[in-house]
Image (cartoon, coloured by chain):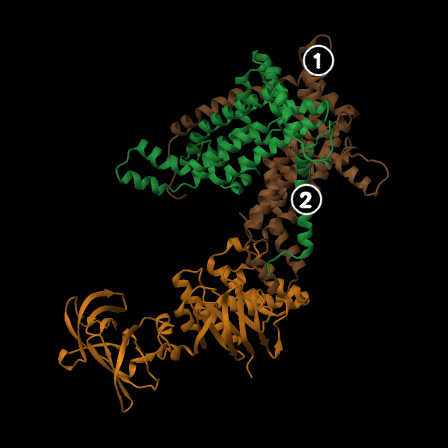
Chain colours: A orange, B brown, C green
Amino acid sequence: MSFLHLQGLVKKYGDFTAVEKMDISVEKGEFLSLLGPSGCGKTTTLQMIAGFTVPTEGRIIIDGKDVTELKPNHRGLGIVFQSYALFPHMTVAENVIFGLEMRKVPKKEARQRVAEVLELVHLEQFSQRFPKELSGGQRQRVALARALVIKPNVLLLDEPLSNLDAKLREDMQIELREIQRTLATTTILVTHDQSEALAMSDRIAVMDKGRLVQIDDPLNAYEFPQSTFVSNFLGKTNNLEGTLVGRSDGRMQVRVGDGVLDVRDTGPSVDGPVHLSIRPEKLHFADISKARITARIQTRVFLGNHFMFHLDTPVGRLLLTMENSGDAVKGENEEVGLTWNPGEIRIVQGDR
Amino acid sequence: MAGGKLKGVLPPYLLSAPALVLYIALLGTPMIMTFVLSFHAFDFNKGILPGFGFSNYWEVLSDSYFHEIFLRTFGLALIVTVICVVIGAPEAYVLSRMKNPWRSIFLVVILGPLLISVIVRTLGWALLIGSNGVVSKTLQSMGLIEEGFQLMFTFSGMVIALVHVLVPFMVISVWAALQKLDPAVEHAGMSLGASQFTVLRRIVFPQVMPGILSGSMIVFALTASAFATPAIIGGRRLKVVATTAYDEFLNTLNWPLGATIAVLLLIANVLIIFSYNRLIERKYAQVFG
Amino acid sequence: MKTNGTPALIFHALFVAFILAPLIVICLVAFTDKGYMSLPTDGLSLRWFRAILENQDFIDAFWVSLYIALGSATIALVVSVPVALAVVRYSFPGREGLTAFFLSPLMIPHVVLGVSFLRFFTEIGFTGTMIGLVLTHVIIVMPYALRLVLASTAGLDRDAEKAASSLGATGWTVFHRITVPLILPGVAGGWVLAFITSFDELTMTVFVASPSTTTLPVRMYHHIAQTVDPLIASISAVLIFVTLLLMIVLDRIYGLDKILIGKG
């Protein structure tokens, strides 16, 4: 029995369809990310769950109760806004206690709960400060504390980390994840940052042009993308397009450019071009004699913990990443051999 | 400061020199002369007397005739300000929740009259509320009232016309404060369980308070020194400070007394503005900065 | 979610009606064919618009107002631009005080200014001259002009000037090829706002205008003090119409909302 249920959710603005037939079930305590580029409908979906936008069709069910028609102030959700939306005229403590006042929680208990939640987000020292007097990261924590203190049945996070700098963002990802695990609050994160979604979620729902295109746990979504869009959006990838030239014994031969690739047949019926995807870290250098294909290194980019190579190959341009292990590294313009495990080449759906 | 500022004392003062000369000659000198004038005594036969003294100030501060005028003026300013807050602040909020193009259109409709001469706008009210005015005529023809009524030459008439003249300033101030409001705070309040009314009272209102205060200051100061509207709508009997100064200068020709009234009006104005600034600094610097 | 409910829209409609009512009434009365104030119930007539042309007093006053507004707005802008550059570009002792001084006429009631100018011109024997009137108007309109020029100067991207210098432009070339075009919309907006403010000014001018330098608002005030007739309504209707045209011009060159916010 799932806890949060989106049933055939549709949002139309005139002729424009912002969200198309969304069906998602979220388990109690689960951390789900809605991931996609801007304009994919993820924010609209969140706004509908929160009650700030009325769906054109479909139902929203939380804990067995249909809340589609419920006003936002009666849904009992905790929301962390992208801008944090702190009340600038109230201190940290006043911000956090606001939701409890609305619930008419007795003063004493309310103060106790505020103290607890501020401790949880490490802001005990700052309860009497105004938002203006806090750093970006601290404001973020206040926003989180304010959403958590009401013990929401669902926590909605709307791009909560996008206003933080890169270093702080990584720290907060881990912290947010830990807090979510501790409280086991059902959580929906809206983000356009794939690494954020991969790092934090139990499952990722990838959206594109108002549609849900894949919903999977992070590892599966990354390893087995179902479309070129998902493989491109989650991490870096090499997308190849070819034609089927042979198919037998669970293997497919696909002609790409001047080469033929051997691919594990995952069983799709094929008419027209075949779309393949292989992650850059799954390609390896090899002796030319033992290699599947030969390539020439066009550019080499050093990125600290790893190198990135752009390669000219018979099947087109390929991207290869290699850990910086301290060993000697091939240079630009060198002829190299390439190999890979054929099972790592995925057959995906092309873009519509 | 991005780009950094240039150092040097001479260049900026050279750049400001033309304006500075103009201001000292045409603002500084006349103001000082008026201040000095207010300490001269006056005799209806001999004109301005050479001696200095506080006789004019004493006259204004002790005469109940002037008390009434000052009380009327500041009472008028207070009532006009309160009404402007009560109708202008909600209107600014309604405007801020409109979608374009309506928002831009109505912003121009409401603020545009600021560019139309005060005398024209006052005339409009004279036409509306006079005894032969449109309001009176319409109500009569509808049979709602028996006899024509008249708000011309009444305190209420002055209030209505001045609210009309000055309420755009309130809308501007509150509007500017609303623009600084993070649109998500209202959603945040609701998500925490607050009703629409609670959101307005506890989240929106406190944040636009600086705008309401600055609008109030502008409206109060401008009402207290208004001339054209009280002169036309209030007429001879309902004198205010500005019309009294005018009469002393151009009718009774008691210039020192007129100057005294002007100086007192200026002092009152400056006091209001400074105490407002103090209030804002003390109360809001920490919160809004 | 963030939309206005019906009560809010009703309130809004009443508010707009309140704002527009006196202006509409003026425009209606201006078209009456009667000899007294009334709504044009028996058809529109241009009688009172033709009457304006026969009133030389008002025509003269219009020209006086026009000259004063043109002169004072231009002088105010010419002295405002260097002030804005000094205040925005330099850090120097007295910078804050100087800015406050130049904006101070906003705080002074026009009645007080009128009283002071009258006293001043009487003492130096300069009463009722055109030049005197123009200069007093400069004091009144300069704060409005300065505020808009300050805003556009402060918003200027200094890197564009640095880029021009790095490409070999001299100081003067940078000023007239880069700086001036960039602040021009603000300057032009400031000029029009100054023009309108001067053209509309009554309270100060009523003290210093002589019979030969009576401006249109002063003439209208004296007329209304005597009698309220359809003639004054037709003149007002023309003023409303001209202001509307100016508002459209302002909107084109600088954005009307920015200027109106500056007026507050």
x and y percentages locating residue A278 in the rendered image: 29, 76
For the residue pair A150 and A68, the one nearer the viewer reads as A68
Residue at (61% x, 79% y) in the render: A64
* Quadrant of residue C90 within the rendered picture: top left
Q: Is residue A124 above or below residue C226?
A: below
* Quadrant of residue B160 within the rendered picture: top right
Residue at (45% x, 27% y) in the render: C79
Q: Is residue C214 above or below residue B94?
A: above
The amino acid beneath tag 1 is: Phe
x and y percentages locating residue A335 in the rendered image: 14, 71
In the picture, measured across the screen, residue A238 lies left or right of residue A335, that is right
Q: Residues within 10 Å of mark 1 (few under 14, many from 20)?
A: many
Q: Residue furthest front?
A: C43
Front disc: 1 or 2? 2
Identify residue for label 2: C17
Q: Residue furthest top?
A: B46
Q: Is residue A160 above or below residue B182?
A: below
Say which element carries label 2: helix
Q: Is residue A57 visible?
A: yes
Q: Is residue B34 visible?
A: no
Which of the image's four quarters has the N terminus of chain B?
top left
Disc on res. B42: 1
For the residue pair C247 and B276, the one nearer the viewer reads as C247
Q: Is residue C13 above or below residue C174?
A: below
The residues tagged by marks 1 and 2 sit, at their Cα atoms, a distance apart of: 49 Å
The amino acid beneath tag 2 is: Ala
The chain holding disc 1 is: B
